[in-house]
Each structure stands twice: as C-alpha cells, then as structure tokens.
Image (cartoon, grey):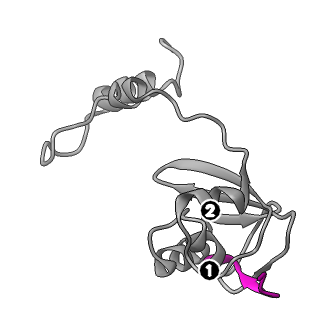
Amino acid sequence: MTPGIVRVDSWTWSVRLFKTRSAAAAACRAGQVRVNGAAVKPARPLVVGDEVRVRVDGFERIVEVVRLIHKRVGPPVAAECMIDKSPPRPPREAILGIPLRDRGAGRPTKRDRREIERLRGRFPEER
C-alpha cells in the first residue's frame, strides 16, 4: 500500500536518513534538506522521482525517491524506497588527520589561524 501524500520529514525519517522525525523536521527548518535543489519546509509533499539532498553529520546524502512510505521500516526495505546517489565518504584516516585545538586553549593567534587554514587547504602556502 502506497500512501497518497507523504511529508518530506516523515519520508526521510522512514527511510532512516534521520534517527527521529523531529530531527528530520529540525533539519528541514535549518535548511539542511533540499528537494530538487530548493530548501523545503518539513510539510512539503514528496512525489516519486524527486531528488532529496540531506546534510547529515557534515556529509551530504543524495537520494532519489523511488517509493513513498510514511512508517519507519527496516534497512533492507528502506534501501528499496530510494536510489542512493551520494558521493563516497572520505576515508576515516583523512577525517581524523585534521588537527583540533584543545578545549579551553583560548582563541587562536593569527599565526595559529593561518596554519589551520593552510592545513585545511583554503589558502596558499605563502603570501
């Protein structure tokens, strides 16, 4: 049985992109959920063929709606309801290689900030 109208927050929760429906609704309100390239409110209805982009934990998930569901299902059934077009995540070693400042170390100096930006690849080596 396929329901007629399914809200975007309910669908993203149902296919396990978010742990709770309230987290899915909050992400919609924060602009972290886009349908066909446009930021959406939680109550926006979905149709089969829509492209949903979700920002979760700093990574973007891109899925295409294949089947509309309104109740949470297990992972095998959830995989049948969408086509995952997400780019592969970077290796864990690359993520862990980014240095972090110690908590309570204070505000970074200008020199520290330049080194952080250089490590992140935002600025050239020397100016």
Q: Can you identify the residue that label 2 sits on?
A: 78
In space, the residues marked 2 and 1 are separated at their CA atoms by 13 Å
Place of residue 3 in the rendered image (x, y in percent of width and height, measured from the top left): 77, 86
Residue 101 screen position, x and y as percent: 22, 37
Quarter placement of the N terminus: bottom right
Which residue in the protein does label 1 denote? 10
Which amino acid type is shown beneath numbered disc 1? Ser
Which quadrant would residue 69 be assigned to in this image? bottom right
Identify the secondary structure beneath mark 2.
helix
Looking at the image, is 111 positioned above or below residue 45?
above
- Of all residues, the one furthest to the left in this rendering is 104
Q: Indicate left or right for 113 with 54 as reference.
A: left
**Numbered label tally:** 2
**In the picture provided, is 13 more to the left or to the right than 8?**
left
Graded by Cα atoms within 10 Å as few (under 14), some (14 to 19) or many (20 or more), the crowding at tag 2 reads: some
Q: Residue 47 sits in which quadrant?
A: bottom right
Q: Which segment did they paint magenta?
A: 1-9
- Three-letter amino acid code of the residue under disc 2: Ala
* Left or right of residue 97, residue 90 in this image: right
Depicted 23 relative to depicted 62: above or below: below
Reading the chain from its start, which is encountered first: label 2 or label 1?
A: 1
Q: Residue at x 73, y 83 (%)?
A: 6
Q: Quadrant of residue 120?
A: top left
Determine contact: label 2, label 1, CB under 8 Å. Answer: no
Is 35 on the left or on the right of 49, as rendered? left
Residue 106's disc number: none
Q: Which residue is drawn at 69% across and 86% down?
A: 43
Does residue 47 show up magenta in the picture? no
